[in-house]
Structure formats: structure tokens, C-alpha cells
Image (spheres, rainbow, N blue to C red):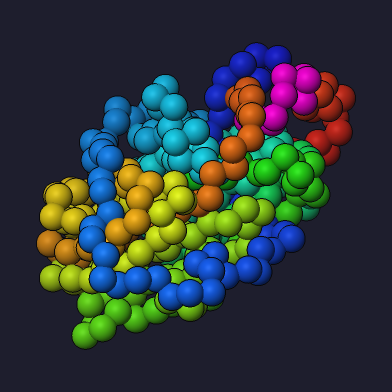
Amino acid sequence: MKRKDFLKKTIIGSALAAVGFPISRNLFGKEKLQTNIGKRGIEAICSPTNTHMVGNGFKVMNFFPNGKGFEERMSPFFLLDFNAEVNFPASDIAKGVGVHPHRGIETITFAYKGAVEHHDSKGNHGIILAGDIQWMTAGGGVLHKEYHEQTFNRSGGAFEMLQLWINLPKTHKMTPAKYQSIKHTEKPKVELPNGQGVVHVVAGEYEGTKGIASAFSPIHMYDIHLDAGADFSFQLPKEFNSGILVVDGSISVNDKKAPENHYVQLKNEEGQIHIKADKKTILMVLSGEPLNEPYVSYGPFVMNTEEEIKQAIDDYNNGLFGFLQD
């Protein structure tokens, strides 16, 4: 495929991890959040969307951007693709997404079932297994690819992944590309009372426990695993754009049902977020301070101006993103 044809398509990036220029301030401020307030409002509970293939290895439903302004509504989070559990047959043909570029964003992949292997033009390589995360800061530009890990590909089996893009602030758009592979056992965690489950703190903090991944703007990201009957509450800053994806299981959020593979958009207002789990459940909680900056997106690039997009295309065509063999 010619470069110009490739760039016309929206490529859903894999997720690499790199953590640079960490934000160390307490995102909740110095005062403890109140516990005697009402419940935070729910703006929408979104049903699963139609699925489409990304490359030949990811069968995803897209929750945002979805043509309804969610790339602004959930800023700094720009894209959320979810590959709900699907069984891939054993194969000798590589499955995944071939070499493609990114600039201006961070791309993150969460593995729930199956295994993914990553390579990029900076020489980084990683394999993520169930529970692991790849976090890549594309920054000023990088090429990468990700495929089903070879052993998994040859044996086949259950595959479940989440892919996320986070828009970088203008001041960090051209930061050097970086990568981090985060093992599930490395995630800081908070045990919920009475053995109800665990909050794995990926970024930001939860009840004073700080996440393992730094970010370029204030965010909270929780990988929450609940047992059946779990019943607890927490809060997020009211000015942060916040949502919850029900990866597996089923919950009630502030007395409203959110079944498996549904996305809950929370209102930007103060209030408790009360969760009840109907069965064993996995949740992804996203919360971030809006960037409030102009943006222009074109395929795998998210920048602030049309001129920067044109420059990204020129730089890619001129080989400035490096080289990576497909």
C-alpha cells in the first residue's frame, strides 16, 4: 500500500507505553474529597457498537471518537476501541496491525486475554500477556507494529484487548518517543474492604496510592477487578471528563444498570460514584482534565493545526520517523 493511501485511513494504534516528564502533583488537591455529597450524574450509558477489523488481528467496537464529539467530550482521551472477547483460531499467518506511524499522542493497549507483541522504530520490543499494559508515547513521531504473540497465534484462543489514545498537550506534542511495558504484577493496587475486589492504579492516584504510569496532563486510570456482590463508592474531580467501560461482568452505577461491554459517560459534576457488581466484573475507569486546546486529526496523527498535520505527513514520507521492517 502506498504511503498516501495508508494515511487516508484511520489506523487504530496499538498501545505502547512510555512514561515521560511525569506529573507529580496531587491531582485531588490538598484537601480530602468530601464523603457527604450526593451521587454524580450519569450523562449516558452507551451500548456496544458494531465491530470492525483493525488489520487482521483486532475485532473492535469504537466508543469514541464516534462522530458525536466524544474526542472533545472525553479530552484528553481521544480514542477508545474495545476488542471484546473473541476466539481466534490457530494460525500460521501473522495477525495484527502492520507498520504504521503516530505523532502527537500516546497509545495504550490493555491485555485481558491472549497476548500481543510490539516492535517500534526506536528499537523497542515487548510482549504483553493477560493483565499487562503497553504504553507508548508517540510524541514527535514513531513507527510501530503489533501482532498476536507468536505462540498464542499458533495455538489460538480467547482474545480480549482495549486500545486507547491520549492526546498530548501542545507543549509536549513533539516530545521524544518512548515505550514502557507494564506487567500486571507491577501495578500499584488498593484492596477493597471485605475482599470485594482490587483497584489497580494505572495512572493518577486512588485513595493516596499513585499509579505506575506518568502522563503529560492530569489523568486517573483504574483497572478495577470486582467480585460478585461488591458494593463501594469513590470520587473523581468534578471538572475531569470521566467514563467507565464495563469490560466483563455487569454493574449498577448510581442505581443505573450497565451491562457487559457498555460504556458509562459521567457528568462533569461533584458526586459519589456508587458501584454494585452483579457478578465478577472488570472495569476500566478513565478520568482526565480537558486540554481545552484546538486539535486536528488525520489518520494516525493528532496535532493542533493543519500545518502541523502537513508537516507530519511530510516527515513521514521523508523517512524521519525511522525505519521498521514489517
Provide residue 182's location: percent of width, then percent of height: 57, 66
Residue 273 figure quarter: bottom left
| Residue range highlighted in magenta | 300-310
Looking at the rendered image, the quarter that the C terminus falls into is top right
Is 197 situated left or right of 169 in this image? left
- The quadrant holding residue 5 is top right
158 part of magenta stretch? no
Residue 318 is left or right of residue 208, and the answer is right
Image position of 288 with respect to 80: above or below: below
Tell me which residue sits at (66%, 54%) in the image.
Answer: 216
**Magenta span contains residue 305:** yes
**Placement of 246 over or under 99, stated as above or below:** below
Q: Nearer the viewer, residue 90 or 307?
A: 307
Vertical position of residue 10 compared to residue 152: above or below: above
Instruction: Kindly identify the residue that appears in the image at 83 percent across and 27 percent down.
Output: 315
In the rendering, at what x and y percent does residue 94 appear?
53, 40
Residue 58 in view (yes/no) = no
Look at the image and tell me in which quarter the N terminus lies. Answer: top right
Which of 287 and 180 lies nearest the eye of the viewer? 287
Identify the residue shown where x is 41% and y is 54%: 238
Q: Residue at x 32, y 67 (%)?
A: 234
Q: Residue 81 at x, y = what percent?
A: 43, 39
On the image, the x and y values in percent for residue 59 come to: 38, 36
